[in-house]
Every structure is written in structure tokens, then in C-alpha cells.
Image (cartoon, helix red, strand yellow):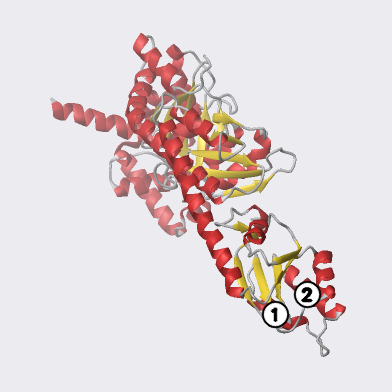
Amino acid sequence: MDPSLETPLVTVTLDRLLQALPGSVRVLHPGRGDSAVRWVGPSELDDPVPFLVPGEVVLTSGMPFRSADGHAEAAEAERYVASLVQAEVRALGVGLAPHHERTPEAVTEACRRHGLGLFEIPPEVSFAAIGLAFAQLMETARARVLRDLHDGTRRLLGAAMGSSPVQDVMMVLTRGSVEWAVLLGADGQVRAGASPASAEQLEQLVERVLSGSGSRLEIARFPELEAPVVEAHPLRPRGDDAVAVLVAGSRRPLEPSAAGTVRAAVTVLEVLQHRRDGRREAVGELAARLLLRGSAASPATEALISRSAGSSERRRLRVVMGVPRDPGGTSAGARFWGHLLDTDLVIPEDWGFTAITRRDPSAQAVSEARRRGWLLAIGDPVAADALRTAAVEVTAVRDQLRSSDRSLRQGEQPPSVASLLGPQAGAALARGVLGPLLEPTAEAAEQRRVLTAWLACGGSWEAAARELDLHRNTVRRQIETLQRELGTDLGDMGVRADLWVALRFAAEAQEARTDDDGDRASR
């Protein structure tokens, strides 16, 4: 991070410090009045730089630049002042006793040339008095920060209790702490507020925030903006999944009170999001299941769509399904997918999730899903009463995700035998062809894994062994065992084709078997 963009701690400016010094102290050069002073300390070393902190004011009796005859030589003064500036010292205070009756002209000229603050301390003013003035200013600054932070937090909490809490919180921010603020979803879409920066300008900043974990702050500078200092904060209502990003712009790095108010706003927005999610998650899943079962015609369901499917525009709906690239890979909850796709209509599935949304998932949303180890099957927009059929068609796209290793939109891949069969017919084929391989045991799962790899490798023992990380003789023995158990000839291409298609529907066949067993038990 650029150090110039860091949020300062409680600070006192050089200008305020110089104004607070005893009246007999004479300012010879004001230096950079708006620069932050972090410490005031004495030093009589010829080279104090190794012991200084950036932002320090150095007090000296003049020993470092006193020559043998008691005067300061220009070369020595130049060296000393230049080293202080290099160490980011804010000002130099020169005591007039016992070495100098007045500040050497060579020192004064060097400070003016380098822009270093310079003040002259008479004998009756101790260095301790200078340090005390600084300490009192720091206490005043801390009190001001705490007061401003309290006021900002009080206003945020008041906004959170209104009828439009998110919008009101964003308004509080832009009326005090920052010039502008915008709340972006994980898909890069605006949820609240507004920004003078384009989506393209903010994209990389938002991606850096989303790729992190835990509390995280990213700061960047956009010189072309009127408020060029831009902060991005993740919203993580539950766990490490960032569901949104708060981006705020200011004219300069935020003062401590303003920075604290922005962080308080992040917390308030997370609470609001958590409260909203907890209330709507179960309702959204129920509504989605009703829609996919063809119950979209009722007024109640239509109302659920209008509240839950994202976007205020009356767009058609689309089905989106997601699967992990690796079946045992990264998990992500329904809540995260709801935020990414801007919808409450999300159904967690054993194999991934199904969502219904009005938004066309953006390239950023697809990229974010892949970064988390997921692939998306994106359906075409349809009317609500066509969602059931649309889900069948998207299922066919979903079945092709892992083999293509990329997210797909409906129509990007030609239809396959699996897509033409559909889940019900495919499950029936799997039950008839796979038989004992559908048993809910670890042994059956391993047999399906071996058979899938062997078929995918065209019956090659060597290639399948590499894919499975097994010895080729082990693969050969397992395939021969499978052939006996299935009572079929695995050398027949027609048999292989049936098995290949059937394996695509193994999960559906197992689910159907479980449902049948449950029905028999209930009877």
C-alpha cells in the first residue's frame, strides 16, 4: 500500500503545534504546516537519523552543527538539515543556550531551502515545555476523535432503524465522513449509493477485497476523480464469505474519526445484511422450490418473485445452477450465491445449488465463482410459468460443466444424449444398467469412480491407472470384477456407451431409490 494513503493515527499538525508553543518561541520557517507530528524529542547527536521516527520534531541546543569556533558552517548545516528531511522530520527546534546566541544563519537558510520547519527556543523555555505542549494537543485530538466517532456512530444507528436502512446509512456516510460511497454486490452490481468512478475503475480494487479473508481494507488513488482516495471494505455478515463491498471516496486520507465512522458503517451494514438474510433465506428456498414445480401462476408466488428474484425491473427469469469443479472442493453457502446472483431464490443441493434470478450473471460474477472453485450453468431468460422446463434444460448444461471445466450458458454446447434424456429417463437408465453400483456404500462409490475413469480413457488400462493413481493391474482386476457383477461384456461399445450415459445420472438414480425406500417405509 502507498504510505501516503494510510489512515493516520490521532495526530497533531505542525501548524497547530507551532501555534501552541510559548509566546517567546520564535518561528523562523513554518515548514509544511499540514504535516502530522508524531513525536517531539531532544537530540544532540551529529547523526540522529537512526533514532528518529517519521513525523518527529527534533529539539537541539545546536551541538550537531557547532564548529570549532562556535559558528555553524554552511556545509555542516546543509548535511545535518538534509539528513533530517530525509528521515521525514517535520521541524527543528534550536535552543539558544549555551552554544548559540541566535540560530545560525546557515541553519536557517538550509531549513528554508529544504522546507524544514524551524523555530528558536529562548533560554527561559525548557525543552520539556515544548514536549508538554505537544502532549496536551494530543490529548485534545484524542478527545475530539472520540467525540466525532460517537456522533457518527449515533447517526448510523439512527439511520439503521429507518424504513430504508441501507440507503439511509449510505446517506449518513456521504453527509459527513466521505465525499461519495457505493455498496457493490459480489457480482460488481450497485446495491446502494452512487460513485463517480466507473465499474471498470473499481473492478480490480473490488476483486482484491473479495479475494481476501477476514477483515480487510484496500486503498487506491484515482487522480482523475475529484475525491481520488478510494477505500474498499468487505462485508462479511457470517464467516469469511464477502457478500458485498463498501467503496468510499474522499479528497485525502481519512482522519481517525472519519475512518472510524466508515468502519462503524461496515459493521452496521453487516448487521442489516445478516438480519435480512436470516429472515428471507428459508422463504426464498421454499419459493424457489414452488416455482420449479410449476406453481408460478398463483398471485402469492408472483409476489415472492417480485420481492426475492433481484432487480427492480420486470425482467424475465433465468435458472442458474452451480457445481464445484472438484466434487470434494470448496463449499459456499446459499447465502453467498444469493448475494452473488442478487436473489433470495436459492436451493442448496447435494451436488451444488439451483438459483432463480432476474439478473444475467456478469463476467465478474462468473469469475468470482471460478475463483472459489465453482462452475455455473446459466439458463436463458424465460417466463415464470416456464421455469420447470427451463430447469431441465439447464440441468443438461450443468452435466457438461466439469468435462468442459468452464461455466457455460445455455446454447453454448450442442445437445448430448444425456441432455436429451433428461433426469427422469436418465435415472431409469442408470437403475437398469448400473444395478449394484448404485448401492449407498463406499465400495460402490469406488467402483463407479474406477469405471468412469476407465470409460473416459477409452478402455486404456495405462491411462486409467494414471488418472486414478492406481497400478494398471489393480484397474484391470477391478474392471473384470465389475464385468462379472454387471453380467455384461465391457468390450461391447454399445454397452460402454450405455454405462457412460448411465453414470451421468447415478446421483439422480440414487435419490429416486432413496425416495422409493422412504415411501415404502411410510406405508
Residue occupying the far left of the picture: 523
Q: Residue at x 48, y 13 (%)?
A: 383
> Viewed as shown, does residue 97 lie left or right of 288?
right
Q: From this viewpoint, is residue 407 visible?
A: no
- Name the residue type under label 1: Ser
Q: In the rendered view, does 507 fall on the left or right side of 310? A: left
Q: Quadrant of residue 86?
A: bottom right
Q: Mark 1 falls on what kind of element?
A: loop
* Separation of residues labelled 1 and 2 (CA atoms): 10 Å
Comparing 59 with 333, the one in front is 59
Please indicate, yes or no, whether residue 156 appears anywhere in the rendered image.
yes
- Residue occupied by mark 1: 61
Q: How many marks?
A: 2
Count neighbours of disc 2 (C-alpha within 10 A) and say few if under 14, some if 14 to 19, many if 20 or more: many
User: In the drawing, what numbered circle is on residue 168?
Assistant: none
Residue located 54% across and 47% down the image: 259
Relative to the observer, which residue lies in front, 362 or 448? 362
Can you say whether 425 is above or below 500 in the image? above
Residue 393: % across, % down: 48, 22
- Mark 1 closeness class: few <14, some 14–19, many ≥20 residues within 10 Å: many
Image vertical order of residue 293 relative to residue 99, above or below: above
Which quadrant of the rendered structure holds the C terminus? top left
